[in-house]
Amino acid sequence: MLIFIDAYDMLHLDETFWSSRYKNGATGWDIGHPSPPLYQYLCQLDNKSADVLVPGAGNAHEVAAGWLLGFKRLHLLDISLLPIQDFLRKHPSFPAAQVYHQDFFEHKGWYDLILEQTFFCALDPAKRPEYAKKVHSLLKPGGRLVGVLFDRDFGVDGPPFGGSAEEYRAYFEPYFEFEKFEPCVNSIPARMGTELFINLKKLDF
């Protein structure tokens, strides 16, 4: 299930907006478990010492799963404090120093991998060029942006905001080498045929 917000509210995609979604249970983007494409990607990685950021992590199912897989340098970021507090209650052994209650665009860090899962589609589309630039700045040389993007037009005002592969290429091509940018074959059933799987390697300038 996906929950759409009216055009008035989309002008106010700030902490108050997103916290109200959690308070009201309007979290249709949350599938209740790790996204299969991201989880299966993490399962294939041997370097468990990689610094990994999950921005807009929400309830952070991917963070919890990665932690259990042995990734101990996972970092969780969200603009709303509510899901962060809930995550730390459920996972008290997770290092609080690796959790950021922060606007993504104000974050400073240095990562081998950034995982993208329903964060890009939650942003005001006008910020998409800035997102690509910001991700590039947060990645170490050779770092990667890996995850899924919606490849569809929702036909209504978001969030979520849809788009197309052609549109996304224009944002990322100045900053990344495209190693994978293709239809996702292991989406959840409700999203099958509507997602792209991306594995983009940072271009070093």
Image (cartoon, rainbow, N blue to C red):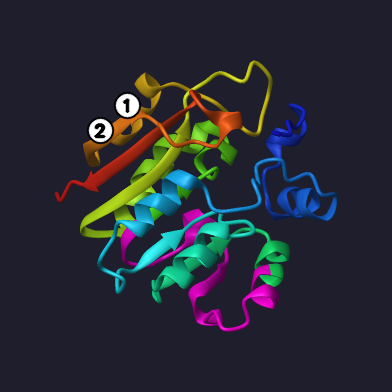
Type of amino acid under label 2: Glu
Type of amino acid under label 1: Ala
The residue located at (35%, 20%) in the rendering is 166
Element assignment for label 1: helix
Quarter of the image for the N terminus: give it: top right
Q: Within 10 angstroms of label 1, few (less than 14), some, or many (20 or more) residues?
A: few
Which residue position holds label 1?
Answer: 170
- Locate residue 201 relative to residue 168 in the image: left or right: left
Q: Are marks 2 and 1 in contact (CB under 8 Å)?
A: yes
x and y percentages locating residue 82 in the rendered image: 73, 64
x and y percentages locating residue 39 in the rendered image: 44, 53
Element assignment for label 2: loop
Q: Quadrant of residue 168?
A: top left
Q: Within 10 angstroms of label 2, few (less than 14), some, or many (20 or more) residues?
A: some
- Locate residue 77 relative to residue 5 in the image: left or right: left
The residue lying toward the viewer, choosing from 41 and 5, is 41
Q: Is residue 70 above or below residue 178?
A: below
- Magenta-highlighted residues: 87-113
x and y percentages locating residue 134 in the rendered image: 38, 50
x and y percentages locating residue 196 in the rendered image: 41, 31
Q: Is residue 180 above or below residue 105?
A: above
The residue lying toward the viewer, choosing from 201 and 38, is 38
Q: Which mark is residue 173?
A: 2
The residue located at (61%, 30%) in the rendering is 190
Specify the farthest residue to the right.
Answer: 24
Q: Quadrant of residue 44?
A: bottom left
The residue located at (71%, 50%) in the rendering is 18
